[in-house]
Image: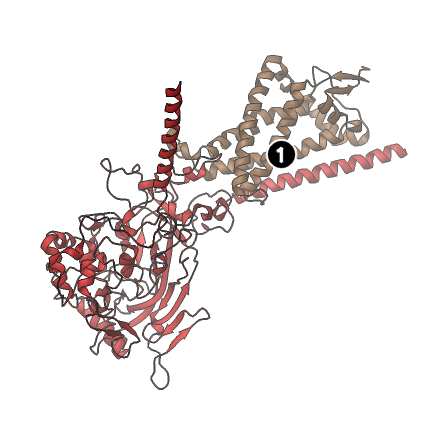
């Protein structure tokens, strides 16, 4: 075993700021949705808007970082047999004591299932949220930019559905991140940047 | 050097003075009690008014000596004709024709109803609408507060001390001093306008709900513009007049005034909409800036009249004519009151309900209000709307408006299925308040307007929507987002659009929560399975 610098300072900043913003937007978003009352409707709307713009700025930096460092390759889809191997591991081997089919390295930080999940997050759920969210935010300007044939109800429906996907993702992410490594090594890595990895093979 | 210093001091001083005078001009003078007239004419010095007047029209004649065109102008107005032709529907509307669910209709009840007419002597159909001396100048221009039309005087004040009701009434209408009133005429006031408009429907606050005698001298808490401790607006500050024609009629209401802020010389002269002074983006910009966004679909009044009948006077909300006419065993009239002292039953009029601090009802309104005409068919099984109006979420010209909805039961013709009006007031035997016979009262009134009446009558429930525009609360008391953006908020009955905070898609919510709860269950099962499997492996 050795300790390898896995996550740069920016990557960790991005991860934790995004975590805060997404969780905050889930809370304020579901308050706006009428699920519960916490901040009060207007406060919730204001916070949701502030967090949304913060996340947009963060994403601009993150996209720039991914493109310039080439780290975007981390999300390239793996072949289906590798994904199936991961599915088999989580479904059976993990209970039977079988070994993890993926070996973490600096060049391949994500296992095939993670690659697929994050790719889906970035290419499907996030755009769904952004586009529906912007339409929702700029509802009053639909006439100005010539958007017709769209209803606020359907935009809100898509936005809410995407929010449920994020919440579901968050539950699974927390489970996997907190329980899959010995002594919360993955969490420590995301805090310190250094990941314990198996260097034997 | 000295010179520069002097100049600087002068500049500073004049700046101070200027800002001080600016501030002073923004604030109203403290002494409000004695209105100082700045008119160039002191009517008490006019020889024409230095004489005894027998009756009202004699005063008008004297007025017309100088104000030669005044009556001709007034002859054109709704205040005089009680008629209004809706430009959009062509309907002839106005007080003289429409049916309401208070005293039902004006016809055949003239001398009582026309005690609020701006004329003298409209007691029957022979009234001469072209008579210039029959215009009552004083009822609007009195500044003494002593000029009061006698309730059954067809527009005349009491010329000798007179009780009301005429026989055995406790309230004495004092003989008016026409000379004194004529000599002190001035601009209209909350009091003169309110003498009729605050008492519509037969009493203080009965009809409108946002206008009652508490608005004669309101504080700014009751109405932020009219408050005497604030801006001290009178009615005519917004209901501007031009040649005696008053702006701001309910019959062709401007539901959305997208015309820019009106400035003299550039725009129209009407101030009878909030937007004519405040424009369409009156709120301070905020993060969400939804208040300015909302002005396109939510009327100013909707948020800024959080409640009506707020001045300590109740407004009538229910009037059931079907129970009228009940008397005690020995034939005496009955009067019942509730715990607040509000009259809930009188023999002459039936049952009432009243309310104070009422929450308005809300509806989309584009301005085109139609009133039910007498010959229109009704469905006695359902509630009949006496007025209807255009407006919906899909209609971009409409906005959500607040209303007082007056409800009640009133007579209808059971065979013809039309509303029926009643001859209530009069000395003749047909009048309901003499005979207590609906047969006679309905037949007489229907005959009078030339309407068919089968002779068979029943009572049906009706509603009448009264748009609210007064009793504007201070901004701190305006509605908050969550008053409407909530599951059971104020707009619960307006369901033709998606309202965030209230609405959701049941499928998205159900599947969404199933996915979330399912995932939580899944990870717990998975984790528990791993725990069990680990322990088993260790034991082996």
Image quarter in which the C terminus of chain B is found: top right
Could you tell whether B202 is left or right of B480 in the image?
Answer: left
Q: Give me the chain that's red.
A: B
Q: Position of residue B260 (x, y in %)?
A: 30, 36
Does residue B382 show up? no
> Which residue is found at the position 54% from the left and 25% from the top?
A56
Could you tell whether B133 is left or right of B403 in the image?
Answer: left
Q: Position of residue B71 (x, y in %)?
A: 13, 55
Q: Chain of mark 1?
A: A
Q: Which residue is mark 1?
A: A23
Q: Position of residue B140 (x, y in %)?
A: 22, 57
Instruction: Give whichever of B409, B315 is nearer the camera.
Output: B315
Residue at the limit of the structure toward the right, as seen here:
B540
> Which residue is found at the position 75% from the left and 20% from the top?
A195
Does residue B373 show up? yes
Instruction: Give whichever of B267, A183 is nearer the camera.
Output: B267
- Drawn colour of chain A? brown
Rendered image quadrant of residue B105: bottom left
> Number of numbered discs present?
1
Tell me the crowding category of disc 1: few under 14, some 14 to 19, or many 20 or more residues within 10 angstroms, Cα based: some
B191 up-or-down from B1: above or below: below
Image quarter in which the N terminus of chain B is found: top left
Question: Which colour style is shown?
Answer: by chain
Rendered image quadrant of residue B530: top right
Q: Secondary structure at mark 1?
A: helix
Could you tell whether B326 is left or right of A89 in the image?
Answer: left
Residue at the limit of the structure toward the front, as seen here:
B2
Instruction: Give whichever of B35, B413 is nearer the camera.
Output: B35
Instruction: Give whichever of B42, B218 is nearer the camera.
Output: B42
Could you tell whether B124 is left or right of B275 in the image?
Answer: left
Rendered image quadrant of residue B418: bottom left
> Which residue is found at the position 31% from the left and 71% from the top?
B458
């Amino acid at each position: 075993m050795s300790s390898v610098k896995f996550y740069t300072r920016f990557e960790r900043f991005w991860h934790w700021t995004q975590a805060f913003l997404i969780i905050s937007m889930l809370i304020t978003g579901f308050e706006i949705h009428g699920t519960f009352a916490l901040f009060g409707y207007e406060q919730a709307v204001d916070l949701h808007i502030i967090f949304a713009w913060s996340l947009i700025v963060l994403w601009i930096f993150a996209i720039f970082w991914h493109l310039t460092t080439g780290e975007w390759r981390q999300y390239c889809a793996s072949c289906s047999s590798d994904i199936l191997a991961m599915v088999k591991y989580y479904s059976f081997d993990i209970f039977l004591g079988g070994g993890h089919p993926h070996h973490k390295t600096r060049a391949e930080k994500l296992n095939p299932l993670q690659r697929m999940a994050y790719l889906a997050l970035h290419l499907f759920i996030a755009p769904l949220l952004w586009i529906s969210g912007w339409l929702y935010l700029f509802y009053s300007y639909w006439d100005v930019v010539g958007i017709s044939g769209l209803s606020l109800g359907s935009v809100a429906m898509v936005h809410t559905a995407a929010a449920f996907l994020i919440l579901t993702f968050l539950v699974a992410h927390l489970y996997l991140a907190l329980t899959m490594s010995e002594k919360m090594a993955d969490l420590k890595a995301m805090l310190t940047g250094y990941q314990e990895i198996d260097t034997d093979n | 050097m000295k010179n520069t210093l002097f100049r600087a001091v002068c500049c500073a001083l004049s700046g101070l003075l200027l800002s001080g005078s600016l501030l002073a001009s923004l604030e109203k003078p403290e002494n409000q009690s004695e209105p100082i007239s700045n008119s160039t004419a002191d009517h008490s010095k006019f020889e024409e008014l230095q004489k005894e007047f027998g009756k009202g029209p004699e005063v008008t004649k004297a007025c017309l000596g100088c104000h030669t065109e005044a009556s001709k102008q007034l002859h054109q107005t709704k205040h005089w004709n009680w008629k209004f032709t809706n430009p959009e529907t062509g309907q002839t509307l106005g007080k003289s024709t429409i049916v309401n669910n208070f005293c039902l209709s004006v016809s055949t009840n003239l001398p009582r109803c026309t005690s609020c007419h701006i004329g003298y002597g409209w007691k029957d159909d022979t009234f001469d609408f072209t008579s210039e001396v029959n215009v009552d100048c004083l009822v609007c221009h009195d500044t003494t507060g002593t000029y009061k039309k006698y309730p059954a005087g067809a527009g005349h004040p009491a010329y000798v001390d007179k009780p009301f009701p005429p026989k055995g009434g406790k309230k004495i209408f004092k003989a008016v001093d026409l000379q004194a009133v004529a000599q002190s005429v001035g601009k209209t006031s909350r009091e003169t306008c309110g003498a009729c408009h605050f008492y519509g429907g037969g009493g203080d606050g009965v009809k409108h709900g946002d206008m009652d005698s508490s608005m004669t001298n309101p504080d700014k808490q009751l109405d932020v513009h009219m408050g005497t401790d604030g801006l001290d607006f009178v009615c005519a500050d917004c209901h501007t007049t031009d040649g005696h024609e008053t702006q701001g009629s309910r019959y062709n209401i401007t539901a959305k005034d997208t015309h820019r802020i009106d400035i003299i010389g550039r725009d129209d002269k009407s101030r009878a909409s909030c937007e004519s002074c405040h424009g369409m983006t009156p709120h301070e910009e905020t993060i969400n800036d939804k208040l300015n966004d909302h002005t396109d679909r939510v009327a100013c009044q909707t948020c800024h009249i959080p409640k009506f009948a707020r001045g300590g006077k109740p407004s009538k909300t229910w009037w059931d004519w079907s129970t009228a006419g009940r008397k005690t065993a020995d034939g005496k009239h009955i009067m019942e009151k509730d715990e607040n002292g509000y009259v809930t039953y009188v023999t002459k009029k039936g049952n009432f309900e009243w309310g104070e601090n009422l929450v308005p009802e809300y509806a989309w309104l584009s301005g085109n209000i139609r009133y039910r005409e007498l010959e229109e068919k009704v469905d006695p099984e359902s509630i009949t709307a006496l007025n209807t109006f255009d407006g919906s979420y899909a209609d971009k010209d409409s906005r959500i408006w607040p209303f007082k909805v007056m409800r009640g039961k009133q007579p209808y013709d059971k065979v013809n299925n039309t509303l029926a009006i009643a001859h209530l007031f009069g000395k003749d035997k047909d009048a309901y308040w003499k005979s207590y016979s609906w047969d006679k009262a309905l037949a007489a009134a229907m005959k009078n307007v030339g309407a068919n009446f089968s002779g068979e009558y029943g009572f049906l429930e009706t509603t009448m929507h009264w748009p609210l525009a007064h009793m504007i609360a201070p901004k701190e008391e305006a509605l908050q987002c969550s008053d409407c953006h909530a599951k059971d908020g104020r707009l619960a009955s307006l369901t033709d659009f998606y309202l965030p905070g209230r609405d959701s898609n049941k499928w998205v919510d159900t599947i969404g929560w199933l996915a979330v709860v399912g995932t939580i269950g899944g990870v717990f099962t998975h984790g528990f399975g791993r725990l069990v499997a680990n322990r088993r492996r260790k034991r082996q």
